[in-house]
Amino acid sequence: MATGQSPEDAIQVKDAARALSEIITQLPSVWIEGQITSVKIRPGSDWVFMDLRDVSADATLNVVFNRSVIESSPTEITSGLRVLVHGKPEFWMNRGSLIIRGKAISPVGLGELMIQLEKLKQKLTAEGLFAPERKKSLPFLPKKIGLICGRASAAMKDVIENTKLRWPGIEFDVHEVAVQGVKSSAEVRASLSQLNAEKKVDVIVITRGGGSFEDLLPFSDELLIRAVAASVIPVVSAIGHEQDTPLLDYVADLRASTPTDAATKIVPDLEDEIDLIDRFIDSMRERISNRIEREQVSLERLLETSALNSPSEFIQSHRDVLFDLKSNLRELITSKVNNEQSWFKPRLAQLRTLSPLGTLARGFAIVQGKDGKLIRKSSDAKIGDLLDIRVEKDSLQAQVTK
């Protein structure tokens, strides 16, 4: 057989198919978990064909069972059932497709699903996705609400009608998606991503009505949980009834027990807000009225005082007090000056006695040269020197002639 490594060595389709079949046939049998999306039994055929889809990803395998295997199952094998399949990979040459030839099939038990869900919950908790501190606050009054819900569902009607009853002018951007089955998680994630990208809403509500544990499994899907955690817009979870707690409830920024409860939590009640404003206005009026009454009482008391009732008497009484203080101050100053003069006069007389001015008053004079030095004897001056002569009240100049 040609190698097929070049156009000249191209192999035939049957040879390529046979080679692939030989490789796949060597693969071992495996256990596969998934959700049945379709079951086909052809009339008169011994074979049952079904599509097995991953519950959280866009991946599907074709599985073929002998009809006797399906008929021997204690549980009815129907579309939507989550199952475990044991089978061996095969390559069907005539179709050119990979299939799993099933040997055994059994529904995934509710207990096992719960165990898996609890393990996922612990994993996401450890990563901090459910931590209260990462949750975002909802706006007091959103202008527009993004609503992800089932197509023409009662949950959609409940949220919209009850929200508009509370705040009539609110707007919605509604995304109708599958809220059950294998497509649900992907469609919810796609709408969540679109709302975040468009940034036209202030809060996002993900809602559906009640259902069985299996029906609500898409809202515990790991990919959806991570998408909600990454949302920049606050997300409200309103899934099922009060007792239903999918993992979406833990990661959402706010959990509503029912779709109706979501309406009460995302917008205030207009009538309540009007009543609150009225109460604030009444309280403000009462406070202003009380303040005016207190000020009126204070003003009346002030008008009754002597200062305003008889201003001349009030001024005269203070004038008398001021006059007395002035007289006392004058007496205090006079006494202080007299005391200081008594102390100062004998010392002034003593200072005058010791002062050169006293000597000058007795007819003496002080003679100085032009350099300011005292002339004490005739030899201190020369003929022609100019001298300053200080007498009692003034001074004169003289020139030495001999």
Image (spheres, rainbow, N blue to C red):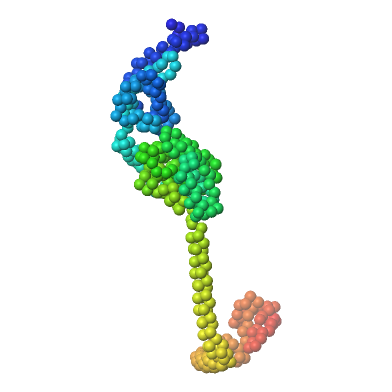
> In the picture provided, is 384 more to the left or to the right than 16?
right
Q: Is residue 233 above or below residue 327?
A: above
State the quadrant of the C terminus.
bottom right
Q: Is residue 244 above or below residue 338?
A: above
Q: x%, y% of residue 289?
A: 52, 75
State the quadrant of the N terminus.
top left
The residue that appears at 33% across and 30% down in the rendered structure is 76
Residue located farthest toward the top when viewing the structure as drawn = 1
**How many callouts does the rendering have?**
0
> In the picture provided, is 226 more to the left or to the right than 323?
left
Please tell me which residue lies in front, 355 or 233.
233
Res 254 seen here: no
Q: x%, y% of residue 285?
A: 52, 71
Res 122 seen here: yes
> In the picture provided, is 382 more to the left or to the right than 336?
right
The residue that appears at 44% across and 16% down in the rendered structure is 95
Q: x%, y% of residue 345?
A: 53, 92
Which quadrant holds residue 113?
top left
The residue that appears at 61% across and 81% down in the rendered structure is 375
Which quadrant holds residue 363?
bottom right
Q: Is residue 246 above or below residue 166?
A: above
Q: Is residue 179 above or below residue 234?
A: above
Q: x%, y% of residue 346?
A: 51, 92
Please tell me which residue lies in front, 197 or 31.
31
Please tell me which residue lies in front, 185 or 344.
185
The residue that appears at 44% across and 30% down in the rendered structure is 58
